[in-house]
Image: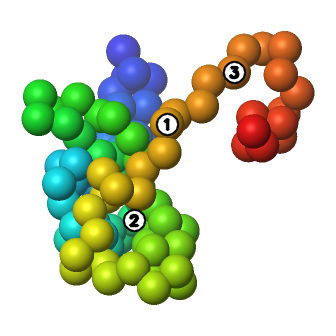
Amino acid sequence: MAEGVTRSRAIEGRFRPVARVPLDATVLQAARTMYECGTEAVAVTNEEGRVVGIFTAHDVIGVVGLGFGPEATTVAQWLCSPRECNNHVPRGEAWFG
């Protein structure tokens, strides 16, 4: 029993709520959320609160680097379709497509 309590205390405080933004959030809002939460990515949710994608700091760089305004561009405009793969796809290949 003491061991379980020790493990509980050991992981207590290591997990935090996932930073999330709605699909209609602007890139600027997403970047601000990342900054305030101390993370480099936010989960993107639909109207039902279901996670439909991830928006990252790398995506922010892409938006700004390509000249899109972060205050006028929504994360929905930037999300791409999620990729799926099975056990037979070699590691690393899932990133290319």
* Residue under the point 45% across and 85% down: 67
Is label 2 in a helix, a strand or a loop?
loop
Q: Quadrant of the N terminus?
A: top left
**Amino acid type, label 2:** Thr
Asked if the residue under mark 3 is in contact with the one under mark 2, i.e. CB atoms within 8 Å, the reply is: no
Q: Position of residue 55 (x, y in %)?
A: 41, 56
Q: Residues within 10 Å of mark 1 (few under 14, many from 20)?
A: few
Is label 1 in a helix, a strand or a loop?
loop
For residue 64, side relative to residue 76 (left or right):
right
Quadrant in the rendering for residue 11: top left
Q: CA distance from mark 1 to mark 3?
A: 13 Å
**Amino acid type, label 1:** Ser
Q: Which residue is mark 2?
A: 39
**Amino acid type, label 3:** Cys
Quadrant in the rendering for residue 28: bottom left
Q: Which residue is mark 1?
A: 81
Colour pattern? rainbow
Is label 3 in a helix, a strand or a loop?
loop
Q: Residues within 10 Å of mark 3 (few under 14, many from 20)?
A: few
Residue 91 in sight from this viewpoint: yes
Q: Which residue is mark 3?
A: 85
* Residue under the point 11% across and 35% down: 47
Q: CA distance from mark 2 to mark 3?
A: 26 Å
Q: Position of residue 77 (x, y in %)?
A: 34, 56
Front: mark 2 or 3? 3
Residue 17 in sight from this viewpoint: no
Q: Position of residue 46 (x, y in %)?
A: 19, 36
